[in-house]
Amino acid sequence: MKDIKRHSAVAFKATPLKNQTYGDWDVVLEYHGEGDGPWLVDLSHRTRLDLQSADLAAKKPFGITIPEVYCQSVLEKGVLINRMNRIQASIYHLDGQSMDTPKEKEYTDVTEATIFVAIFGSNVFSICEKLSALDFIGADKQTPFLFQGPFSHVPCQIVTLGREAEKSGVVLTCSRGYGKHMIDGILHAGEEFGLKPAGEKRFADWINSL
Amino acid sequence: MMNRFNHLPTLKIDVSDKIPFTYKGKTYYGTKGDTIATALYANGVRIYARSLKYHRPRGLYSMDGECSNTMMEVNGIPNVRTETTALKPGMVVKEQNVKGSAENDLMGFIDKMDWAMPAGFYYDTMHKPAKIWPVAMKQIRKAAGIGKLAPDHHMPGKYDEIFPSCDVCVIGGGPAGMKAALAAAQKGLRVSIMEARPWLGGHFEYRSSEYISRQTHHERAVQLAKEVEKTENIRVFTHTANVGVYNNNLITGFQVGKESDSFTERYIEIRANSVVVATGCIERPLLFENNERPGVMQAGCALRLANTYGILPGKIAVFSIGHDLGLETAVALHDLGLSIPVIADIREDGQDPAMLKAVLDRKITILKGWVATEAHGGKQVKKVTIKSVDGTISKTFDCDVLVASAGFTPLTGPLVVNQAKLTYDNHTNFFLPTDLPKKMYAAGRLLGFENAKSIEASGHLAGLKAAYDCENCSIADLGEAKKAMENLPGPARGTKLVTAPVKGRKTFICFDEDTSIKNIKQSIDKGFDVPELIKRFSGAGLGPGQGGIPGHNLPLFAAKYQALPDIKIKPTTVRAPLVPTLIATYAGTNHTMFKRTPMDEMQRKDGGIFRNIGVWQRARYFSKDFTCKKEIENVRTNVGMLDGSTLGKFRIHGPDALNALQRVYVSDLSKIKEGRVKYTAMCNDDGCVIDDGVVIKRGENDYYFSTSTGRAGQTIEWIRYHTRYDNWNFAVINLTDAMGVINLSGPNARKVLEKVVDIDVSNEGFGFSEYKEFKISDTIPVRAMRLGFVGELSYELHVPSSYMKSVWLMLKEAGREFKIQNFGVEAQNVLRMEKCHIILGQESEQRTNLLDIGLGFLWSRKKTGCKTVGVAALAQAEKDNTRLKLVGFKMENNGRAPKDGSLIVDDRVRGYVCTARNSFSLNEAVGMALVEGDMSKIGTRLAFYEDECKGELIYGTVVQTPFYDPDGKRMKM
């Protein structure tokens, strides 16, 4: 019998320096030559949940209150919750130990449905504006906030977590099938700004700095 | 190469940095900062190209690419605007539209044939006999091309795109634009400036005349530009031409990259809350005989040649102008060494006294109320005749340059493409914008201001108005700015002269299309009396200059010639792109963006040949034999693996999940039992079948269902739309990408599967149409179905995508002893066709309903509690015998299969072939077709008309279906 492994749709050409196994996932903590930023980190192994309920206000996933305003997000205890619409929120596990799916039927584990990446560091919004007409730096929005719109012409969820210089960054999910071409597109757009693949350690440092 | 000035503060060149380039096979040198056109001019080139129709010699005229005069072939690319294209080392520059050379063009004789080509001559002469036209057209195109591009030309360079947002976008980086940007930015707004030239400053930038005491216009431009550049919230896009403005202030343009940029050109699409248009003016061409002869140029062109590029335009220049910039140019060029025998000023009075004094101080003769009437010289200007405006007195002067300009024309394109209206203004002689769209403002010279302070103040006011739109400016601030404007000079009076007193045979109103005043008169005389009609009949304004040269003169002349009491005539409609550029720029980076399945990599390694199918890339073949004989035979006799991951997959749950399913599916899904698979279909309101798939009940109010690949993206919207008034409580989640699918098919499928899983997969343990959930190695969750799409024993395994690679490799290893093989989409297509299982979109089109394709059995007429989409239409269509029916056919005499899409005919079209192939399983050609009801009877002979068959029909006969395993024993084995 072959070894059982889980594979992300995101694959970087960079050489891993440090790896760690989470369940059946082999996660790169650091790559050779990550540079000074901006960085692109694959988070596809991190749990994402879909929560749909007619009474969303009554739900408190992981003890966190879901934002009332559509497209507003909240980051608490390493969990990012994004209000999508009247009945729906998306939940991303960003930091800390793995996250279990709540037992209620309203939750669906959609980790497998999407790729999940973070783009952060200097010039991140210069990269974003090459791929999307969404306004990540408009003064009318407070971080963290959610966009549900096109990025490189693909429908995505993009959450802006930071907008201050080096702490600028977004996390992005899109259909898993687009993984390879989306990553190619992001890396190509970021080439002139020195965008490099990075391991999860770099991401953890960024999240902790926010 | 002529000596060039190197001491002027306005210069944009570095004469110490020589740039080599090739022109007509010889090496020449320009300097850093040159455009191609200025480098050629500095090297003595005066004739750049020949005109489109008459092959007249053409030279430098405007410097802003307003006409095709200086379009040349550069590095193999035709129609490059050499006036605005920066010179780069190694460029290869060639003339275009010449037979021989631009200097000696063998086609030049056509210029004398103009009598034979009046306006619209091809409409008059080339329709009788009609067959002449294709021949004539070819000859005309041969004679009048403007460049050729090889079909296999590979566009060098890197083309990019950006989509920035801002609060205020300012189009035009001259003094008004910069002041507008600063005003808005000082209110804390994000501002973008688009400037077509490679630097800010507009018409201040190249002028050494006095702005205020001890400050020149150039110095003021530099001062403002520095202020703009140091303002953090102003983003400057230089060398960026605006090409369009659309609803809700979407502004498009393209930027030419500098050496340090990562792009050659990039497309820019700015979304702004408010827009200020401060694009200034171009000069209105003066109309006289031979007004486009090389050596004739506009005042701004002559001045910029000297002040920006360090080139004195000639030795002796006559001026025929109608504005103070003309006088200023004469003074500046005189001081640089140009001999000026005379200035013919159209105006009798109204000149700036200081400027007039400067002219007289230099002892330059100025004749007020005079105008150039003819430029003499075969290929270049050698002398000029000027006349009093009434045409009574004339004088002739030798010269090599004629600086000619009637007045100004506001650049209103960005306003007009966004639906602003233009109205003639008697004072300025401009067509001024009125009824501006909301959140859009005009400023600066385009409103007629010529006073420098007024220009800046109007920009400041427009910037504040834009800020007010963004709720960042007070009424008091606006009032203050308006008051400041009131204390400054208003718009200047414009010159009214339209044309010099000439007959107009060689007076060109449009250089691009060689349209003369005489042609315009001919058009009007034939009844084409407004610019839109004149344009189309005479060609004026149809050329690559986008109407830049004739835009303003055409309506003025049309009004004058018809002696209209007031000028209600409007310029022709301006459309995007206001400035044309490369298609490569519009294409941008064009990232490949398709979906790949979790098994993509393994299938590529196994030799899969991929095709783009909808949003997916799928393995269509696994060998270069596109009949897929081996793949098909392997499935029929052994076992194969297909990647079916592209199928749509969804979870629907909640108290009203069943109601929602009942609404969109035609079957009664309340009867689904857990552990069973239910095949069903969806229709639209017309009863036309739009999707099919299977539904599985996984628990109380919890279902898993599949859709066809093409419908996956629309399924949630479809369900939500058709339940929008019901207030039902259910949730739908798209799991298409979450689950990979392997279709394990063939008589040995069970033997392979049982080596991998721990459950009983015998026919008794896991029967046809059953559904099971289990884990592989206690780890990998699998949702498995016994289906038979390809007509054989089949297992459809739905597995979390991240585990798919592991499962794929396990099955391959387990199947090694059976020589398991991949099969692709084409093999699947043939296998299912032999079984007469349909693929929607292939055996149906948008008019095909559920009954037409024989799926009526899915429709539950007894379903209660919930109306189903499309069933009312189906009930009506049920009695309609005229509809197309899906039939199976075999070919006569063991003939080949017709092409998909071939028509079925008798004395008219009676249907078409959906899918037909030469079947290896049946050893004959079979297919499915949609035919009219009366042709669907078994035994009906069908005649197939294929494309390019030249009338040679092939024949088949309607037969019973399915062709393969009619009892269905093989998929239930």
Image (cartoon, rainbow, N blue to C red):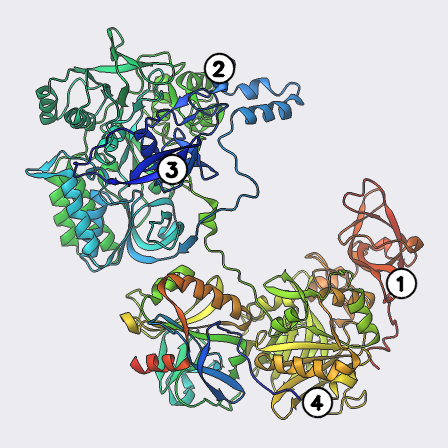
First in sequence, mark 4 or 2: give its number: 2
| Amino acid type, residue under disc 3 in the picture | Phe
Q: Image quarter for residue B843?
A: bottom right
Callout in the foreground (4, 2)? 2
From the image, tell me which residue sits under label 3.
B21
Look at mark 2 in the image and give the residue it sits on.
Answer: B109
User: Which of marks 4 and 3 precedes in the sequence?
Assistant: 3
Image mark for residue B923:
1
Q: Are marks 4 and 2 in contact (CB under 8 Å)?
A: no
Residue marked by disc 4: B757
Q: In the rendered image of this protein, does residue B447 appear above or below residue B237?
A: above
State the CA–CA distance, disc 2 to disc 3: 31 Å
Task: Point out residue B292 in the picture as x, y percentages from the top left corner.
Answer: 36, 22
Residue extending farthest front:
B27
What is the count of numbered marks? 4
Q: Disc 2: which chain?
A: B
Callout 2 crowding tier (Cα within 10 Å): few <14, some 14–19, many ≥20? few
Q: Which mark is residue A64?
A: none
